């Protein structure tokens, strides 16, 4: 079928009738591939048609009101010339639009998009991770938050990294790792279908902090602090004293019991503090507690030793207003006590070393070793997933009943240290036991 062509002028272009429905095409008899498209709504626009790598493509050049006939002929010639070279004008137009949008997107906008849509192999980012990234943008990078990410360059990164590292080197590392992730997200979000980056061809954080780069990551020493063996009994007696509700306020008692829980289980503070009563079975044949929210995304159910049972029974007895959390907070929106900082300071004083929440995890692991619990069972009790064949396929039985003997060993060892400390205070001699 032969396509009818017309002698088009500016005047003639306005005289073509409007179709009752759909659209009508009027092809120019002078410029190949130039057409006037008229829709039933009355819109009149110029289009160019040609072939890109053997496939027919149409591209809108502009509205008749904005583009005269002679200009349309010139533009059509350029577009068809690009098509012959294999250039798809639609793709190029999208690239230009994308680049224009990318040039103006701010770090805050990227951050909001990242925390909403970022997916890991375990799913969406955790609330604590999202909050940490927000705080970095609002604090360390507040001067960049509402500026286009395209303006962040290597020189700015180097200057800011050196500045922040003077007072908080480890926090600076974390902040810039988060910034690197945000900038990578921006690069990918605004990349073209063929993989070209419209902004930040190189991530300035990666560029500045590469090997032999202008700056290097601050050295991070692995923490090894824990409650000294000779002080564990004394610390336990301290916590038992502060857990006495007849002598101390509720927040103090809760803080003491939370730290006691971490010592007896090796749980992280984020795991222990969010424990809810619906995940605790105090009266079961094998009493257990279940951790649903864990750092490694591996939910686990663990047995409750006798010493831990006393702590949780005490918590249950102090439960008020049907609180769902085992370690509730009287203030704040979270509903649970997330950081027993003041009590940890008292524990540090009793232990004679500066301690943090995570040191209770190391303390548990060492107590378990002293109590004779083998390394495979210790790994399971602290929910550390091994990567070797033996750990993955054999030493992986997390049945609470199987692990009960192990947690009881730890419980008895701890209470024995407390007995030694109590007796020593009374001035009596007791021979320390290693198990």
Image: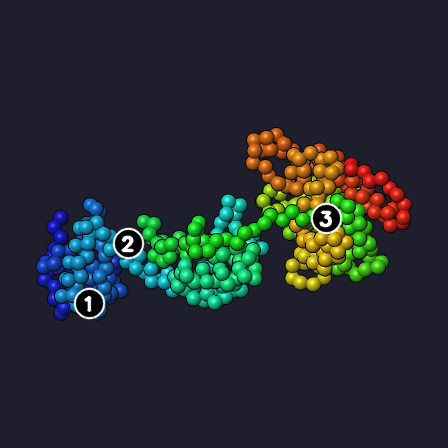
Count residues near mark 2 (Cα–Cα under 10 Å), then give few for <14, some for 14-19, many for 20+. few
Check disc 2 and report its element: helix, strand or loop: helix
Reply above or below: 164 against 433. Answer: below
Residue at image position (46%, 65%) is 144
Residues 320 and 28: in front is 320
Percent across and percent down for residue 198 are 34, 57
Q: Say which residue label 3 marks.
A: 227
Q: Secondary structure at mark 1?
A: loop
User: Along the polypeptide, which appears first: circle 3 or circle 2?
Assistant: 2
Apparent side of residue 297 relative to residue 110 in the rendered image (left or right):
right
User: Residue placed at 60% from the left, 48% from the top?
Assistant: 222
Quadrant placement of the C terminus: top right
Q: Are marks 1 and 3 in contact (CB under 8 Å)?
A: no
Give the vertical position of 184 relative to 14 (above or below). Answer: above
Residue shown at 66%/50% (left/top)?
358
In-front residue for pair 157/199: 157
**Percent x, y of residue 249:** 79, 61
Of the two numbered discs 2 and 1 on the same chain, state the one appearing first in sequence: 1
Q: CA distance from mark 2 to mark 1?
A: 22 Å
Distance from the alpha carbon under mark 1 to that under mark 3: 80 Å
Q: Residue 319 in the image: x percent, y percent? A: 77, 55
Q: Is residue 419 left or right of residue 170?
A: right
Q: Quadrant of residue 376?
A: top right
The label nearer to you, 2 versus 1, is: 2
Q: CA distance from mark 3 to mark 2?
A: 63 Å
Q: Which numbered disc, 3 or 2, marks the residue closer to the eye?
A: 3
Question: In this rendering, would 427 be left or right of 75?
Answer: right
Q: Residues within 10 Å of mark 3 (few under 14, many from 20)?
A: many
Residue 91's tag is 2
| Mark sitting on residue 266 | none
């Amino acid at each position: 079928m032969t396509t009818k062509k017309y002698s088009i002028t500016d005047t003639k272009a306005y005289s073509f009738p409007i179709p009752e429905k759909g659209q009508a095409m009027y092809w120019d008899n002078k410029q190949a591939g130039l057409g006037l498209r008229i829709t039933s709504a009355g819109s009149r626009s110029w289009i160019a048609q040609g072939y890109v790598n053997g496939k027919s493509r149409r591209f809108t050049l502009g509205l008749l009101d904005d583009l005269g006939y002679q200009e349309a002929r010139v533009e059509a010639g350029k577009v068809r010339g690009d098509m012959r070279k294999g250039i798809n004008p639609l793709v190029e137009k999208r690239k230009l639009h994308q680049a224009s949008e990318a040039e103006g997107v701010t770090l805050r906008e990227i951050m909001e998009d990242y925390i909403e849509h970022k997916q890991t192999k375990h799913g969406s980012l955790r609330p604590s991770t999202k909050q940490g990234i927000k705080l970095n943008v609002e604090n360390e990078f507040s001067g960049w938050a509402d500026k286009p990410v395209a303006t962040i360059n290597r020189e700015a990164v180097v200057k800011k990294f050196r500045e922040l590292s003077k007072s908080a080197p480890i926090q600076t590392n974390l902040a810039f790792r988060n910034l690197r992730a945000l900038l990578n997200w921006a690069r990918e979000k605004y990349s073209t279908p063929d993989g070209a980056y419209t902004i930040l061809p190189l991530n300035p954080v990666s560029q500045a902090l590469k090997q032999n780069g202008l700056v290097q990551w601050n050295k991070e020493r692995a923490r090894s602090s824990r409650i000294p063996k000779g002080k564990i009994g004394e610390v336990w007696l301290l916590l038992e004293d502060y857990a006495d509700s007849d002598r101390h306020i509720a927040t103090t008692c809760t803080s003491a019991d939370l730290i006691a829980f971490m010592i007896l289980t090796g749980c992280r503070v984020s795991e222990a503090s969010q424990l809810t009563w619906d995940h605790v079975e105090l009266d079961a044949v094998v009493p257990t507690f279940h951790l649903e929210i864990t750092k490694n995304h591996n939910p686990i159910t663990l047995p409750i030793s006798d010493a831990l049972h006393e702590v949780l029974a005490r918590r249950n007895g102090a439960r008020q207003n049907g609180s769902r959390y085992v370690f509730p907070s009287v203030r704040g929106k979270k509903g649970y006590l997330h950081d027993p900082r003041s009590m940890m300071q008292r524990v540090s004083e009793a232990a004679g070393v500066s301690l943090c929440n995570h040191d209770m995890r190391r303390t548990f692991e060492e107590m378990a070793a002293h109590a004779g619990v083998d390394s495979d069972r210790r790994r399971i009790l602290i929910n550390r997933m091994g990567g070797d064949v033996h750990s993955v396929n054999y030493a992986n039985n997390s049945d609470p009943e199987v692990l009960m003997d192990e947690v009881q060993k730890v419980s008895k060892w701890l209470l024995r240290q407390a007995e030694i400390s109590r007796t020593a205070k009374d001035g009596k001699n007791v021979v320390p036991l290693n198990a």
